[in-house]
Amino acid sequence: MTNGPGLPFVPGIVSNGEFLPPAPSARAEQITREAMAIAERAARRRGMDRRRFLQSAGGMAAMLTATNLVAACSPGGDGPSASPTTTDRATTTTGGRYETPAPEDIEACEHALAGTEFIFDVHTHHVMPDGPWRETSPRIADMIRRLVPADCVADDDYECLDRISYINDLFLASDTTMALLSDVPNSGDADAPVTFEQKVGTKEFAASLTRAGQPRVLVHDVIAPNFGDLDARLDLVEETAATGQVSAFKVGARP
C-alpha cells in the first residue's frame, strides 16, 4: 500500500529508518483510503489540486476526519466491522474523537488546529552530499540511499537528505519547534556523512533564518569508547564539549 501523495501523517506503525515496520494494518489502509477520498472532494470544492490541499490545514482535518470515520466502525480489531459483538460491548469503552471543521474550510481548519505546543524532535539526521563518505564508506552510503523519499526529484538522490531539505522538512513542512541533530554512523571525518563542524554549521544556519538568531537546532554528539584508542576518544569528547556547541552526548558504537 502507498500512502498517497503527501499525507499529513502516516497511519499505523512507521519507522525512522532503523527498523523494518510491519505491513500496514487493514485499519491503516482504510484510514488512508478515506483520507484521500475526503481530500479529493474537498480539493475540488476549493478549486485546487489534491496535493496542494493535503499540504494545508484542510489536509490535516481530512486525515483526522478519516480517522474518526474508521474508528467509529471498528470497535477494537484491526479492520472495520458492522457492529460490536456482545463481548465487544462488555469490554470496549468509548474513546475520544477529533473535533475539526469541514476540511474544505481551510481557514477554519487553520484556526482550529493552530496551537502553541512545544514540539522537540530528539533524534534527527541529515547528510552533506559532497563529502568523501560516498566513496570511503559505500556500506553507509547504500544504507542512506534507502532512506531517500520516494518523491525525490533531485538529480542527486542525496540532495533530498541534505541540510536544506532537513531545514525544510523539520521547520517549514512540520510544526517542530526545536530539533536535536545527531550524527550518522561513521569512523571519523573521512567517512562521516555529516561531521561535527557541519552539524554546528547547520545549527548556525537554522538560527540565521530566525528572528534575532533564535536557536532551533541543537547539536547531539556521540561517545564511542569502543572505537580506536580510548584516550584519543576521550580527548575528542573533551574537545567537542569545550566548544560549547554540544547540547547532549549519547553513547554509541562506531562501525
Image (cartoon, helix red, strand yellow):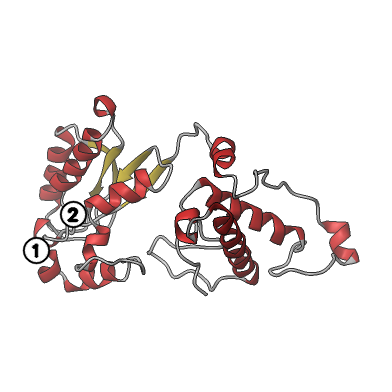
Q: Nearer the viewer, residue 130 or 66?
A: 66
Q: Residue furthest front?
A: 47
Mark 2 = which residue? 194
Horizontal relation, residue 208 to residue 91: left or right: left
Sequence-wise first label, 1 or 2 = 1
Residue 205 position, x and y percent, is 20, 39
Residue 193 position, x and y percent, is 18, 59
Instruction: Judge the density around disc 1: few (<14), some (14-19), many (≥20) Cα neighbours within 10 Å.
Output: some
> From this viewpoint, is residue 36 visible?
yes
Q: Residue 49 carries which label?
A: none
Secondary structure of the residue carrying numbered label 2: loop
Q: Nearer the viewer, residue 218 or 81?
A: 81
Quarter of the figure with the C terminus: bottom left
Residue 3 position, x and y percent, is 50, 67
Horizontal relation, residue 214 to residue 37: left or right: left
Identify the amino acid type marked 2. Answer: Val
Horizontal relation, residue 30 to residue 23: left or right: right
Q: Residue 132 carries which label?
A: 1
